[in-house]
Image: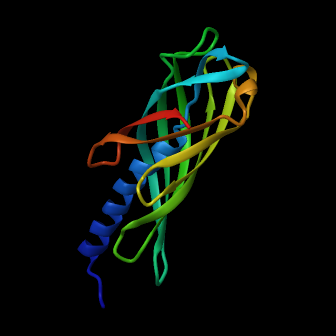
């Protein structure tokens, strides 16, 4: 089967849109803590915005891998005292698709240095349903005590260029 340039471009755009939906999300795993209850951290929901900056696809015989880099903004409006209300992040997501362009899943990493100079690193996976599960794997300053916290989420809206808004909540 010979694929035309336009068919390949359509598949690439489809992959970028799907990836953006999943990726951002994924990493946009921003746990927010407001209080301790019974010795356990109590986490709150958060929202993120993904703005893709670049995308590269590698195609094989039985599928493709698309790597997307995005700039994300995390809404920490429910964060406890001492945490910033808005945080910028850079996210890297790799998405696997089958020959038809259907999402099979992926992985992602988001890194951030907040306005106070504290750093956080999140690692995530997502399935073909677009739901992601992320973990704060490393952090300094206000994030240090939250290392290991897990969140889950998905996109709640997306534009044709792959930009989108996603929602996160405690797992």
- Count all numbered tags in the image, as a single digit: 0
Instruction: For the N terminus, give its image quadrant.
Output: bottom left
- In the visual, does 86 lie left or right of 158? right
Tell me residue 28's x, y (percent): 52, 38
Residue drawn at the location 30% of the way across and 48% of the way down: 161
- In the visual, does 4 lie left or right of 134? left
Residue drawn at the location 55% of the way across and 49% of the way down: 92
Tell me residue 16's x, y (percent): 38, 57
- Find residue 128 and report its image quarter: bottom left
Tell me residue 69's x, y (percent): 50, 49
Whether residue 57 is situated above or below residue 22 in the rendered picture: below
Instruction: For the C terminus, give its image quadrant.
Output: top right
Whether residue 146 is situated above or below residue 95 in the rendered picture: above
Residue drawn at the location 55% of the way across and 31% of the way down: 30
Residue farthest along the bottom direction in this orientation: 1
Residue nearer the viewer, 88 or 146: 146
């Amino acid at each position: 089967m010979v694929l035309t340039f336009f068919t390949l471009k359509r598949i690439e755009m489809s992959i970028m849109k799907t990836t953006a939906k999943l990726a951002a999300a994924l990493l946009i795993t921003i746990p927010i803590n407001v209080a301790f209850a019974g010795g356990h951290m109590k986490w709150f929901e958060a929202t993120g915005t993904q703005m893709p900056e670049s995308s590269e696809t590698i195609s094989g015989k039985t599928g493709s891998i698309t790597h997307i880099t995005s700039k994300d903004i995390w809404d920490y409006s429910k964060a406890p005292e001492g945490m910033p209300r808005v945080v910028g992040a850079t996210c890297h997501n790799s998405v696997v698709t089958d020959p038809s362009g259907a999402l099979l899943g992926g992985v992602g990493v988001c890194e951030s240095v907040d306005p106070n100079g504290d750093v956080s690193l999140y690692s995530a996976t997502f399935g073909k349903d677009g739901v992601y599960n992320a973990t704060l794997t490393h952090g300094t300053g206000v994030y240090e005590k939250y290392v290991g916290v897990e969140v889950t989420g998905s996109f709640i809206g997306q534009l044709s260029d792959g930009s989108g808004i996603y929602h996160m909540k405690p797992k």
